[in-house]
Amino acid sequence: MIEHLEDAGEELKRADHLIYVSLKYTRTADVLLNTLSRMIDAYDYLITALLSYARDTKNLKENPQTPIEKGNLVKKMYPQQEVQDNIDLYFLLRKIHRAPYDKEQEYRRHVAIMTQIDGREEIVNIDIITQYYEFQKNFYGFVVNMLRDFAKEKFEEENGWEY
């Protein structure tokens, strides 16, 4: 569980660099797609950490294999609104990343990816992806705070440390 949180943090660092450094100088749709990919990977790690926590504390027996099943199970296990909203964002990011897209104003400040998702046009530009990133970063903090004490106890238990 701790490893998954660390991996999620590393992916968020990479997404941060892509947003605040790479997009500043490159401004291409490919950088936007790479940022989406990093954010999706971070969500994957966070979802895995939440499922691991549920297995240890809530006697979860299911072991879903696909990302959609994992996300739906997390939504079922954790009723907090922050979890629900972030899993919905995770599903949206996955759809955007997989859908065919059009590029707009590449190499300009308003570079954007436009795609059709569920009959709606979704636009991802620098401002929107920055908002998604900040939302995800807050969720990472929420998950870390929720799992912190349990992860510390489990780590001490596994390594034989006692205070």
Image (cartoon, grey):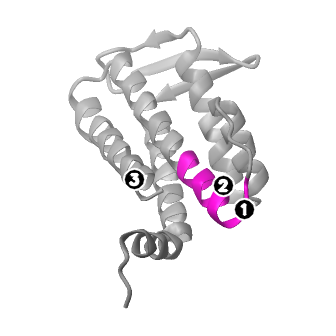
Tell me, yes or no, whether the highlighted magenta stretch contains residue 51.
Answer: yes
Looking at this view, is 3 or 136 the one in front?
3
Pointer 2: what residue? 83
Residue at image x 26%, y 41%? 17
Q: Amino acid at mark 3?
A: Glu
- Magenta extent: 47-60
Pointer 1: what residue? 80
- Residue 118: horizontal and vertical position, in percent? 75, 19
Q: Main secondary structure of the magenta part?
A: helix
Residue 157 appears in which quarter of the rendering? bottom left
Which element carries disc 3, helix, strand or loop? helix
Which of the marked residues, 3 or 2, is nearer the chain's N terminus? 3
Which of the marked residues, 1 or 3, is nearer the chain's N terminus? 3
Between label 3 and label 2, give the one nearer the viewer: 3
Q: Amino acid at mark 1?
A: Gln
Residue at the extreme front:
160
Above or below, comparing residue 151 to residue 61 in the picture: below
